[in-house]
Image (spheres, helix red, strand yellow):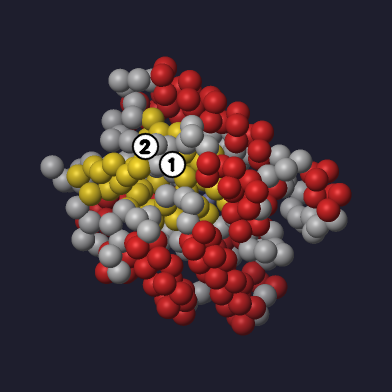
Amino acid sequence: MSFRTIDCHTHTTFSPDGKSTPEQMCDRAAELNLSAYAITDHCECSTWFEEEYYDKLGVRKSQDPFVVYDYKSRFYNAVDTIEKLKEQYQGRLNLICGIELGQPTQGWEGAEEVAKSDKLDYIIGSIHQIKGHDDFAFLEYLNFTEVEIKSLLEAYYSEMFEMVKWGKFDILGHLTYPLRYIQGEQGVKVDNHAFDDIIREIFKTLAQNGKGIEINTSGLRQKYGRTFPELDYVKMFKDVGGEILSIGSDAHRTNDLASGVQKGSEIALRAGFKHLSYFKNRKPEFVDIEG
Ligand SMILES: [Zn+2]
Ligand SMILES: [Zn+2]
């Protein structure tokens, strides 16, 4: 059985970890007959300015040698390019100009500037690292005690709640992102249900403000083997009144584009959603999953 679906979370070479150009991604997306396709390159608010800016302030520098600065110029280059691609692919591809805004909580200046952009259709709000730490991808969880991991996750969800209360984005990115690394890559078991109270509050705030969540299918092709989040949380979002649900492969190369999105639509249906949402000009549009 195949369902109508979308891929509204993907990266191109405008992201430091992207492997395919925007044109390559668009060509592939056009072949796949998606109802909507969004390019959402990284824009990490924590390193919005050039490196010298943080040097002058004397603020903590990342231990991660691959950390990238000056997302500001990356952001403007990306949206200008996608704007041109929208014309180029008109009639062939429902292309959405999006961005994945990382840690607005760690760089409000960049976050506010991005949120005001009139070129953007769509903003995913994500937390990839909590204050005072590197990206969850770079932490060594075997060196942490169970209590320390729990407090990392508490800090993660509370920073997420802070971002959600700010609210100038459309879809909350990969709710359970740290599990990709803690449980998936490094095999350390986590009881995420310990955080259900704050997650329910996050969901209620999103639902009340007409914002949504995504089913991020990248975990299906990674060691974690499941979506971010799984069915139980998609149901919880529905139960508290959530109506806006997106799906994204989080592909960083053409081969992964739309990977798992059929499964994402199936999970959406099982959670009681009849339609998916994508954004144009920061307003939701709906796609019936069956029909
Ligand atoms: Zn992300
Ligand atoms: Zn992403």
Res. 33 image quadrant = top left
91 and 3: which is toward the camera: 91
Q: Relative to 93, is 99 above or below?
A: below
Residue, disc 2: 280
The secondary structure type at the circle numbered 2 is strand
Q: Horizontal and vertical percent for residue 156?
A: 57, 67
User: Mark 2 near ligand 2 (CB under 8 Å)?
Assistant: no
Q: Is residue 255 left or right of residue 57?
A: left
70 and 222: which is toward the camera: 70
The secondary structure type at the circle numbered 1 is strand
Q: Horizontal and vertical percent for residue 7?
A: 37, 41
Q: Residue furthest top?
A: 88
The answer to whether one can see residue 253 in this image is no
Q: Horizontal and vertical percent for residue 202?
A: 43, 67
Res. 146 image quadrant = bottom right
Mark 2 / mark 1, whichever is N-terminal: 1
Q: Are marks 2 and 1 in contact (CB under 8 Å)?
A: yes
Which amino acid lies under the numbered mark 1 shown in the image of this protein? Answer: Tyr
| Residue at (48% x, 20% y) in the render | 84
Q: Quadrant of the C terminus?
A: top left
76 and 23: which is toward the camera: 76
Question: For residue 184, which numbered disc appears in the image?
Answer: none
Q: CA distance from mark 2 to mark 1?
A: 7 Å
* Count of marks, rendered view: 2
Residue, disc 1: 122
Q: Is residue 170 left or right of residue 243?
A: right
| Residue at (53% x, 41% y) in the render | 116
Q: Horizontal and vertical percent for residue 34?
A: 30, 34
| Residue at (24% x, 42% y) in the render | 287
User: Mark 1 near ligand 2 (CB under 8 Å)?
Assistant: no
